[in-house]
Amino acid sequence: MRNKKIVIGVVALLILFSLTLLAETKKLEQIGRYTFVRIKGEVPTEEVMKILLDKYAGDIKYGFDLAGYGDLFLPFMDQLKAANFEKKELPVGEHLMWMLFRSRGKIKVVQDLEWAGKNPLPVFSFMVVKGYKHYEFIMPAPCGNISLRKVEEIIPEAICDLKVSPAKANINDPISVDMSGTQHAKSMEVDIVGPDGTKIETKSLTPDNPKFQTKLSSPGDFSFKGRAINPEGKVSTNPCEAKVYINYPPVCKLWTSCLPCKDYVGRPVTIDASQSTDPDGEVVKADFEITDEAGNRVDSFSDSEKPFTWEKIFTKPGLYTITGIVTDDFGAVSEPAKIEVEVTEKRSFFLIEGGPLIARGSAGPYVAARAGLLYKVVPGTLDFVISGGGSLALKGDPWKSFFMANVLMNVRSGPAFFGAGAGFATKVREERNADAELIGQVGYEMFNNFINAGSLFFEVRAPVGEGRSFSKHYKLMLGFRFIF
């Protein structure tokens, strides 16, 4: 039992001694005895070292895993190919975190070394960067051992990068803001500043969410001022600003050649947007629309040539709303300009009419001509006609030229019309007296362009009064009527 306790005590002392040895810094007094790669001849150049390291990549990976830095292997190999070696001297007493070497053909790693040689050790030094950590590696010049000298965490200043597009836009167009090019930032911010210098909005972003879209509802020069904040809270100092110009929309100025448009059905009405303006460009197009009193669209027109006018003929009377919108050379559209126009139909016309007339059958051929007025009591339905004129006798004695006058009411059904009324005619023969007459007409309208019209008619005139038989006193006329 006593011997067993002695054995346990000796083992414990040995373990404690071993741990003490492990905890102590190893002294490295010479170099070249245990080399990672045995190199013959002169001290290798940087290029030779890179070739050798590439050749022994598997051993290097094993060594990095052994040292507990396996995640650094790929950055080490990638950056080594483009690394710039710096020739240095490792001072006596300088510590190394670990060194990778080969002993009896096996890859080994020793931790916590101190250069304890008599003179400074010539080394090649280069940096490997992963994230914010900078790893300084050295390789002693006489051999290819790889050593990690120190690790420093260097948090760089954030570099702000701001892109805003487009540089010019219209009101409420989408504006894209992109800070994805920012470096070393934990967060980013963008101030949107209006034309008057007032801050409109501040938008917060992150490297994972570096973009956003916005819209600007007024014209002018807007500034987007960006800044980036690194993990230590330090704000970037490099210039980081972009400007966007929001195009001023044009202003539509609308007028018509008549207001109100009395008696303008069938006549051209000029709708004019030529006085429209654009503060920062020019007007390139005008769009017109006409709606009736119920809001139904009647007609529309688009004009892309100056002076931006439209000659419109209204075919029906009514109260119309004319809307004008103009577009500038950047595609911005104006607010609608509106004019209400009451268009009325012409109802009073002068008339002239004429044609062959027969008095009492075949006994007396005449050529008749009359002038007068026509008034549309109910347009398209009922007309009032008053006219008067003369009839020239073509046969001569006993027939006389005479004067006649009419008062009629015409009822219309489309282009056809039927008229009735009364008239007066002076005597057609010396032995006769003047006649009061009842008049009947039937006719057909040949054309009508609202401001004038032409029609053919057939007229019968019957005498009124005792002793004036129809067979001896009637008159027949085939005529053409023109109103204007």
Image: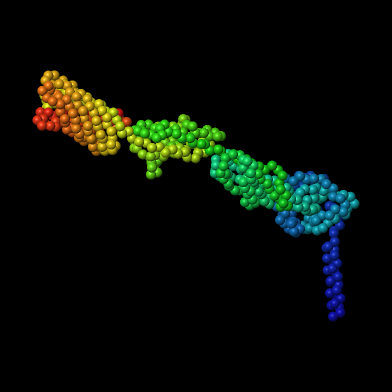
Q: Residue at x 24, y 37 (%)?
A: 412
Foreground residue among 66 and 114: 114
* Residue 180 image point, x, y percent: 64, 47
* Residue 40 image point, x, y percent: 81, 48
* Residue 74 image point, x, y percent: 70, 52
Q: Is residue 115 shown left or right of residue 283?
A: right
Rendered position, 32 above or below 252: below
Q: Where is the C terminus found, in terms of image quarters?
A: top left
Foreground residue among 415 and 157: 415
Q: What is the residue that sits farthest to the right in this orientation?
A: 118
* Residue 53 image point, x, y percent: 74, 50
Q: Residue 237: which quarter of the image?
A: top right
Q: Is residue 254 shown left or right of residue 210?
A: left
Q: Residue 378: which quarter of the image?
A: top left
Q: Is residue 44 shown left or right of residue 243?
A: right
Q: Residue at x 14, y 32 (%)?
A: 464
In this figure, what is the number of numbered marks? 0
Foreground residue among 2 and 336: 336
Rendered position, 16 above or below 327: below
Q: Residue at x 88, y 52 (%)?
A: 92
Asked whether residue 456 is in view, the answer is yes
Q: Is residue 319 shown left or right of residue 470?
A: right
Q: What is the residue that sits farthest to the top in this orientation?
A: 396
Q: Residue at x 38, y 42 (%)?
A: 293
Q: Residue 448: which quarter of the image?
A: top left
